[in-house]
Image: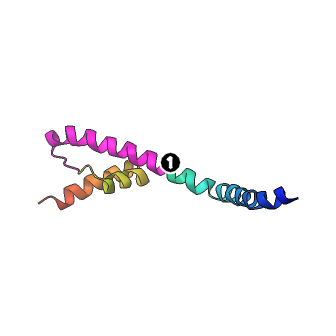
Amino acid sequence: MDWFLDALPWIVGGLILALALAALRRPLNALMRLALRTGVGLGVLYLVSLVGGSIGLRLGVNLANALVLGLLGVPGFGLLVMMDWALAI
């Protein structure tokens, strides 16, 4: 019985960890999907920066623009292009 009392905190901790992971599964999946889409957006921004200078498009390759692309996708790219056009002086 003494071994059970020694193992009880580990058992309870494992159950709490399993419940926490089960409860956070959907938010963690959404966060991982956002991170993947943001990485792809960063790659697209880099490619646009290589080609965009020849057509007058100068979008910054930074995390804020990549997050806009990660959250909004193609409409986010349109938003960034429109903001670049509207703020060009």
- Residue at the far front: name it: 2
Residue 47 highlighted magenta (yes or no): yes
Query: Callout 1: helix, strand or loop?
Result: helix
- Residue at the far right: name it: 1
- Give the residue at mark 1: 33
* Residue beneath the point at 32% across and 51% down: 78
Q: How is the image coloured?
A: rainbow
- Residue at the far left: name it: 89
**Residue 15: percent from the left, percent from the top?**
74, 57
Residue 43 highlighted magenta (yes or no): yes
User: Which quarter of the rendered picture does the C terminus lie within?
Assistant: bottom left
Q: Nearer the viewer, residue 55 or 26?
A: 26
Local packing at callout 1 (Cα closer than 10 Å; few below 14, some 14-19, many 20+) is some
**Residue 2: percent from the left, percent from the top?**
84, 59
* Residue beneath the point at 77% across and 59% down: 6
Reply above or below: 52 against 82: above
- Magenta region, mostly helix, strand or loop? helix
* Residue beneath the point at 19% across and 47% down: 57
User: Which quarter of the rendered picture does the N terminus lie within?
Assistant: bottom right
Q: Nearer the viewer, residue 80 or 8?
A: 8
Q: Amino acid at mark 1?
A: Arg
* Residue beneath the point at 33% across and 45% down: 42
**Residue 16: percent from the left, percent from the top?**
70, 61
Q: What range is drawn magenta here?
A: 33-59
